[in-house]
Amino acid sequence: MTTIDIHEILKKLPHRYPFLLVDRILDLQKGVSIKAVKNVTINEPFFPGHFPHRPVMPGVLMLEALAQAAAVLSFETAGQEPDEKTVYYFAGIDNARFKRPVEPGDQMIMDVSLLRAKAGIYKYAARASVDGVLAVEAELMCATRRLP
């Protein structure tokens, strides 16, 4: 079992506030899966506008959090660390389903499993839950690319 704290996550992902959406890695098995945490607080910059009367984490950011966890898995599996010439793009999202709203105070537990990897393109089965209840699930495709 490999755990990774926020200091190591900052070395493994190019994202920064307000767009870094992974707080801790609870378990990582290279080439297999990752379990990560996003602690959702009322201080998130999107809550004042989504929605002022009932704050809810936007679904696209739930998917982005899953993709960031997947990126850590990809970089670890490939034995890479991102640098200024490495980009990690969404290549596709299939079968996304939102089952439960994610609100301030929730702890989103993300489970991402690698389905296949070829030529820098990765496909994952991704799920996030809150208190053991499924919040979102999707199949994600992401690609790593080197900039010239």
Image: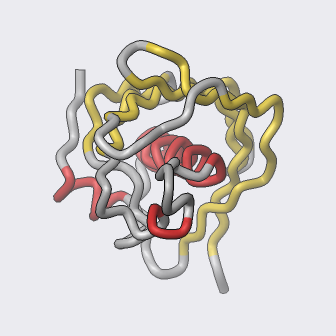
Residue 38 image offset from top left, x and y in percent: 35, 43
Residue at point 64% right, 24% down?
99
1 sits to left or right of 53? left
* 121, above or below 26, in the image: below
- Identify which residue, 41 or 31, lies in the foreground: 41
Figure label count? 0
- The answer to which quarter of the image holds residue 13 is bottom left
Residue at point 45% right, 62% down?
47
* 133, above or below 99, in the image: above
Residue 90 image offset from top left, x and y in percent: 71, 55
Residue 106 image offset from top left, x and y in percent: 34, 36
82 sits to left or right of 96? left
* 112, above or below 81, in the image: above
- The answer to which quarter of the image holds residue 126 is top right
Residue at point 48% right, 15% down?
133
- The answer to which quarter of the image holds residue 136 is top right
- Identify which residue, 70 or 96, lies in the foreground: 96
- Identify which residue, 37 or 145, lies in the foreground: 37
Residue 107 image offset from top left, x and y in percent: 32, 34
